[in-house]
Image: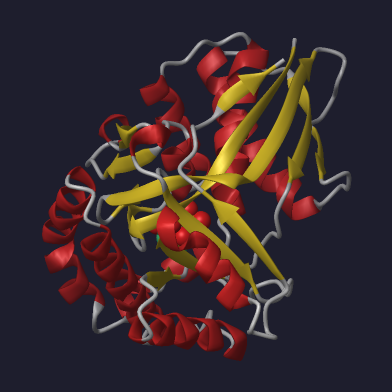
Amino acid sequence: MKYTAIAPSNIAFIKYWGKKDEILRLPQNGSISMNLSNLLTKTTVEFNDKLTKDKVLFNGKEDNQVLLRVSGHLDRVRELAKKTTRAKVAIENNFPVATGLSASASVFASLSLAATKSIGLSLSEKELSILARQGSGSACRSIPDGIVEWLDGDTSSTSYSVSLYPPSYWEIYDVVVVVSKNKKEVGSTEGQKLVDTSPFFQTRLLGMKKKIEECKQALKIKDFTRLGVLSEAEALEMHAVMLTSHPSLIYWTAESLTVMKFVKRLRTDGLEAYFTINTGQDVHILVEKKNLNKLTKKLKELDVIRDIIINKPAKGAHLIV
Ligand code: PMV
């Protein structure tokens, strides 16, 4: 049977960077994120006994690297279903890939849902999150709805994500600023292998539990200032680890820095907004609804911006007919 699923990418307020198990993708720490309403991947999967190998199209094109990773994930699905059938997969992304917008999260979340349904499995949300995690860590946070916590866990069955709040809980926005469509040089799977070479990584780990509690508290009382201050500092801390790894990982470009400094300047001028940034040059800006229009108008002053994508909290992976 053919099934199509849609999943959102997500932006982490408290981030995951570093694994305690490479193969199972068990993270060194828990994390908290928000699913993004306008960064979406649509994936169609059809297992078919007539196929002799998996066939994967990414945005209409064949790509060997994508095929390897997707086929590896389909092997996990085949193992769960105790079948050997090959599949035809079509993945469509509505946003740039490898620029820091976490396409692997939405790709592996939508693939996990469409593939398990197509092979005849009906997994619970927890089981799906565990499966998606093995394709790409952050994908496990794109399975449940809204604002999500990834419980780090020590084993595969205890490392999965749960919804903390539904999408309608709080109308906060993540304005994604696309500064370039150039692809990053080091992917996050490779980059993360370097964490232990940073002198700051162990120090970072010591503070993670407290940060997660602080973030949950800010979310509970809808304290945007607390959430924003925490998220911006957290992004800079994660990048401090990246910058001080050997070899160093420099994901920012001059344009990213221009946007980051612009956000700080806006705050000084009374517009409350905070940046966060992942593995790539594009910048995420967190803002409350009351300041959204002012922010998007202000961003027009910047000539480094190629596109902006406005997101609010979204539901997780779901099937479409
Ligand atoms: O899931 P991966 O391997 O693409 O790792 C992504 C990690 C960050 O995006 C940098 C942080 C996060 O928690 O999303």
How far across and how far down the image is residue 270, in percent? 35, 79
Residue at screen point 30% across, 37% down: 159
Residue at screen point 34% across, 78% down: 236
From the viewer's side, name the closer residue of 84 and 186. Answer: 186
Quadrant of the image where one finds ligand 1: bottom left
How far across and how far down the image is residue 254, in percent? 59, 91
From the viewer's side, name the closer residue of 15 and 137. Answer: 15
Residue at screen point 75% across, 39% down: 91
Whether residue 144 is visible to the viewer of this picture, yes or no, is yes
Where residue 65 sits, quadrant-wise, is bottom right
Q: In this view, does 187 lie above or below 104?
A: below
Whether residue 247 is visible to the viewer of this picture, yes or no, is no
How far across and how far down the image is residue 307, in percent? 70, 67
Where residue 86 sits, quadrant-wise, is top right
Q: In this view, does 275 lie above or below 316?
A: below
Q: Is residue 7 above or below residue 246?
A: above
How far across and how far down the image is residue 241, in percent? 33, 79
From the viewer's side, name the closer residue of 306 and 191. Answer: 306
Residue at screen point 58% across, 55% down: 310
